[in-house]
Amino acid sequence: MKALFKSTATLFYLFLSYLTAFAQTAEKDTTVERLKIRTSFAKSYFGVDAFTTSGGTTQYATQGGLQSVNFSGTTSPRILLGGTHFWGHADFYVAIPVAKFGKVIPKELRNVSYSEGVETGFRVFPWAIQEGKLRPYVGMSLKGLGFAQVSNDPNKTYKTVPSVAKTIFPYQAGVVYATKKLLFQAGVNYKKNMEYQYPISRTQYGALALSPWAFNVGLSIG
């Protein structure tokens, strides 16, 4: 029994000695390479991108019943604020739209408004972002979506119309290419369940189908 106690005490002493030595080594580990690893855990960046939607199909009322019409997508420049984390294996960001271009209103309608708002998302890189390397990613985001349309009917004198407002969670995939100071990115976004009912009048609804696809290209400085 005494021998067993002595052996246990010896092992415990050796274990404490190992922990002490490990801690001292970690404290003294201030080499340039180790400091580089520690400080590269997270890097913030600022940038811009262009986000392009693909339009969709909606319906409007006529004397002969409901008719369908296609409408085009638009391109929105966005401000990007984010940071890469986990030594280049993840990216968390916010994208803020500042304008909208390329809007084309079909002649069958007086106006069409389709917008996707501020986006908050993350991307995961199976292979860490590295200077001079092309890296794929997958990700997901959260944003608001809004749609409204105005009929060409001259008897409609109202100034406001109903709108479809939803919170969506797009999936995304793409690639990035990094230089010493810049990060180039191109991606595709896919949104599920993009078919809705739009109130054409107080008693009638039309089918609204928004394209699930969108695309973006961007440039960031970090």
Image: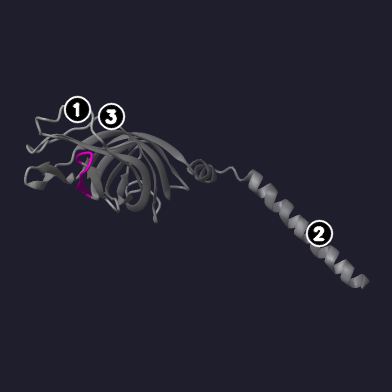
Name the foreground residue: 175 vs 150.
150
Q: Residue at x 46, y 47 (%)?
A: 87
Amino acid type of disc 2? Tyr
Residue 158, which numbered label?
1
Left or right: where 70 falls relative to 37: left
| Residue 10 x/y as whole percent | 83, 64
Q: With respect to residue 22, does 103 lie above or below?
A: above
Q: Residue furthest front?
A: 203
Instruction: Look at discs 2 and 1 and give the one toward the viewer.
Output: 1
- What stretch of residues is rendered in magenta? 200-211
Indicate the quadrant where residue 220 lies.
Answer: top left
Instruction: Look at discs 3 and 2 and give the one toward the viewer.
Output: 3
Amino acid type of disc 1? Tyr
Q: With respect to residue 157, does 123 lie above or below?
A: below
Q: Residue at x 20, y 39 (%)?
A: 201
Name the foreground residue: 101 vs 81.
101
Disc 3, SS: loop
| Residue 185 x/y as whole percent | 29, 44
Name the foreground residue: 7 vs 128.
128
Residue 130 visible at all: no
Kindly identify which residue carries mark 2.
Answer: 13
Kindly identify which residue carries mark 3.
Answer: 98
Quick one: label 2, few (<14), some, or many (20+) residues within 10 Å? few
Quick one: label 3, few (<14), some, or many (20+) residues within 10 Å? few
Q: Residue at x 71, y 52 (%)?
A: 21
Which of marks 2 and 3 precedes in the sequence?
2
The N terminus, quarter of image: bottom right
Amino acid type of disc 3? Val
Q: Residue at x 54, y 46 (%)?
A: 34
| Residue 155 x/y as whole percent | 11, 30
Disc 1, SS: loop
Is 61 magenta? The answer is no
